């Protein structure tokens, strides 16, 4: 009697007699082989097995998953790909915008800085060009400033370069309202102060001290101006000298001492 092998596509099973084969896990797509065949053939092509084949119920369509799913899967993959492709385009478009915007902002900042720097340089050049040596002895203010600092235990290094000159600030654009200007702020290698001569001329003694100590505090202690609010009015670092008009020497002494005391506290 003929014996059959069958395969699930991966493994082969058997050999079985026909009556054994009918109880195996076979379907209408199962391939079989028996001695004498060159290849595996579909079970329905074997006349001898036709009654087995006829007894196998056809596959349910739902079970036919390999075919029905395979097509949509590849379609889905394709759609997925096209979606992510669009997303990529959108991403790259928006990121291009953002990068462009950032570049634009950076360029603007650089240009603004350059313009500011240039106008500062121009202002500096003009102030220097308009400057001249005064017959006023500014050294006494500088010497006193360092002595007063020493009293508070503050010993900043005295720079070799000390330039204190008159400059006609009231004739320079952007400086007309300035009585004096410190250009050595945040540069400890030099003291560089320019004073408007006509301001100096009509200033009282306390006002001159206020002005000099204000500029020297900028220059030597790297202090900034105080904010222009009423609670700061009359203090040494207040940026409006007109607030000192009615002050006397005692006010000046109190004023700079408060600043120096604060310096000691900040250390
Ligand atoms: Zn100032």
Image (cartoon, rainbow, N blue to C red):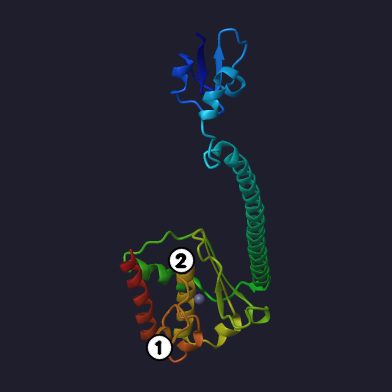
Q: Nearer the viewer, residue 24 or 217?
A: 24
Residue 193 rendering spot, x and y as whole percentages? 55, 71
Residues at discs 2 and 1 in contact (Cβ within 8 Å): no
Q: Residues within 10 Å of mark 1 (few under 14, many from 20)?
A: some
Of pointers 2 and 1, the one earlier in the residue sequence: 2
Q: For the view shown, which residue lies furthest in the bottom direction?
A: 246
Left or right of 216 on screen, residue 119: right
Note whether 66 is above or below 147 in the view shown. Answer: above
Crowd band around label 2 with a 10 angstrom C-alpha radius: few (<14), some (14–19), many (20+): many
Q: Which numbered disc, 2 or 1, marks the residue closer to the eye?
A: 2
Badge 1 element:
loop
Picture coordinates of residue 153, whole percent (x, y) = 32, 64
Nearer to the camera, 44 or 121? 44
Q: Is residue 265 left or right of residue 122?
A: left
Residue 220 disc label:
2
User: Which is more toward the observer, 21 or 104?
Assistant: 21
- The image's mark for residue 248 is 1
Q: Position of residue 115 (x, y in %)?
A: 68, 67
């Amino acid at each position: 009697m003929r014996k059959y092998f069958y395969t699930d596509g991966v493994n082969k099973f058997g050999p079985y007699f026909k009556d054994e084969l009918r109880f195996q896990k076979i379907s209408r797509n199962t391939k079989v082989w028996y001695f004498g065949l060159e290849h595996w053939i579909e079970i329905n092509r074997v006349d001898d097995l036709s009654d087995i084949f006829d007894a196998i119920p056809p596959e349910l369509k739902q079970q036919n998953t390999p075919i029905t799913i395979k097509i949509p899967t590849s379609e889905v993959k394709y759609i997925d790909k096209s979606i992510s492709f669009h997303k990529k385009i959108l991403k790259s478009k928006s990121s291009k915008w953002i990068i462009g915007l950032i570049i634009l902002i950076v360029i603007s900042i650089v240009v603004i800085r350059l313009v500011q720097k240039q106008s500062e340089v121009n202002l500096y050049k003009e102030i220097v060009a308009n400057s001249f040596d005064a017959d006023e002895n500014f050294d006494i203010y500088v010497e006193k400033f360092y002595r007063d600092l020493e009293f508070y235990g503050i010993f900043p290094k005295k720079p070799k370069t000390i330039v204190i000159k008159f400059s006609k600030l009231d004739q320079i654009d952007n400086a007309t309202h300035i009585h004096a200007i410190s250009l050595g702020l945040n540069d400890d290698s030099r003291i560089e102060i320019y004073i408007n001569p006509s301001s100096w001329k009509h200033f009282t003694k306390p006002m001159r001290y206020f002005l000099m100590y204000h500029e020297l505090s900028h220059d030597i202690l790297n202090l900034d101006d105080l904010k222009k609010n009423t609670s700061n009015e009359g203090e040494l670092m207040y940026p409006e000298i007109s607030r000192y008009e009615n002050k006397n020497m005692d006010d000046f002494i109190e004023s700079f001492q408060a600043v120096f005391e604060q310096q000691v506290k900040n250390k």
